[in-house]
Image: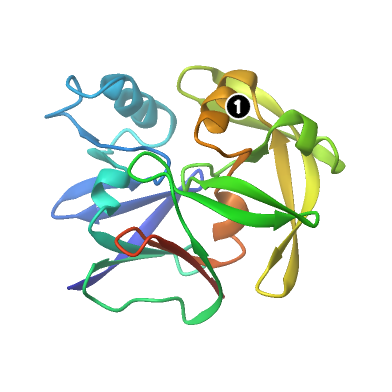
C-alpha cells in the first residue's frame, strides 16, 4: 500500500497525521517513541518531551528508523508531503538523479557523498532541519557563510558556525552550508563511521527516498 501524507513543516520538521496521531518523521532516531513506550527506550521520555516543547506540543509520536525498517519513505519538502510505501510497492522520486547504497541500519543511515572532490561518509538525518554538520577540521576548509542557532536535546540551544561546501550529486554541483559539529555529537557520528550529518541540505534541494528494505537512498530533482 502507498499512502501520501500532507505534511506540517514546523521548524523544518516533517509532521504527519496518521490514524489520528500527530507523528514527527525523523531518520536520525533509531526508535518509534510514544507515551506507551517512552520509559522503556533510552532517553525516550526526554526526546519526546523535548520535541513537544521545542517543535510542536501536539505531537503524539516520534517515528524513527524502527518505522522505516519495512517501508520506503519519500520526503518531498517543496510539496510538503511524505509518501509511505510498503517494501513490495513501487515508489521513487519523479526525476531521480542519484542513488546511494546505505549502511549503519538499524541505528543510522550512512551513505557516501563527494564533498569538495573527496568522498565522505555522512549520516542522513531528516531531523537535522536547521544545520548540516561536518567534523571541525573538514567543516572549516569551506567558505565562512554565517551562523545559525540550533537545538539538541542534551545541549539545548547553541550557535553553529557555517561554512559553504560543494557536493557533487548526479553530475550537478550543489552549494551546501555545513556547521562545525559539536564535540559530543562528533564522537557519536564518528563511532558510526561517518564524518558528518546532513538533513536540510538534501531535502531542500532534492526529493529524498529512504528505502531501508533495499538499503538505498535515492535523490530526485524537484
Q: Is residue 101 left or right of residue 48?
A: right
- Secondary structure at badge 1 equals helix
Closer-to-camera residue (222/96): 96
Above or below 16: residue 144: above
Of residues 136 and 179, the one drawn nearer to the viewer in this rendering = 136
Q: In which quarter of the image is residue 159?
A: top right
Percent x, y of residue 161: 76, 31
Q: Which residue is drawn at 44% across and 48% down?
A: 109
Q: Residue at x 66, y 48 (%)?
A: 120
Q: Quadrant of the N terminus?
A: bottom left
Q: Indicate the quadrant containing the C terminus: top left, top right, bottom left or bottom right.
A: bottom right
| Looking at the image, residue 98 lies above or below residue 155 | below
Q: Relative to 10, is 169 on the left or the right?
A: right
- Whether 201 is drawn above or below 207: the answer is above
* Residue at left offset 80%, top offset 48%: 164
* x then y, percent, for residue 130: 59, 41
Residue at mark 1: 186
- The chosen color scheme is rainbow
Measuring 29% from the left and 79% from the top, which residue is drawn there?
90
Q: In which quarter of the image is residue 45?
A: top left
Amino acid at each position: 500500500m502507498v499512502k501520501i501524507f500532507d505534511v506540517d513543516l514546523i521548524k523544518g520538521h516533517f509532521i504527519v497525521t496518521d490514524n489520528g496521531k500527530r507523528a514527527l518523521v525523523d531518520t536520525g532516531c533509531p526508535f518509534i517513541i510514544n507515551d506507551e513506550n517512552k520509559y522503556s527506550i533510552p532517553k525516550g521520555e526526554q526526546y519526546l518531551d523535548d520535541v513537544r516543547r521545542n517543535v510542536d506540543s501536539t505531537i503524539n509520536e516520534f517515528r524513527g528508523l524502527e518505522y522505516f525498517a519495512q517501508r520506503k519513505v519519500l520526503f518531498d519538502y517543496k510539496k510538503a508531503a511524505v509518501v509511505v510505501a510498503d517494501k513490495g510497492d513501487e515508489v521513487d522520486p519523479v526525476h531521480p538523479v542519484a542513488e546511494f547504497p546505505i549502511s549503519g541500519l538499524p541505528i543510522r543511515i550512512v551513505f557516501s557523498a563527494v564533498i569538495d572532490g573527496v568522498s565522505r561518509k555522512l549520516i542522513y538525518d531528516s531531523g537535522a532541519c536547521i544545520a548540516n554538520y561536518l567534523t571541525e577540521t573538514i567543516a572549516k576548509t569551506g567558505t565562512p557563510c554565517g551562523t545559525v542557532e540550533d537545538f539538541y536535546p542534551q545541549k539545548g540551544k547553541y550557535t553553529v558556525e557555517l561554512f559553504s561546501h560543494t557536493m557533487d550529486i548526479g553530475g550537478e554541483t550543489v552549494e551546501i552550508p555545513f556547521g562545525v559539529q559539536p564535540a559530543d555529537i562528533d564522537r557519536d557520528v564518528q563511532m558510526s563511521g561517518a564524518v558528518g550529518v546532513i538533513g536540510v541540505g538534501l531535502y531542500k534541494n532534492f526529493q529524498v527516498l529512504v528505502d531501508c528494505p533495499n538499503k538505498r537512498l535515492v535523490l530526485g530533482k524537484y
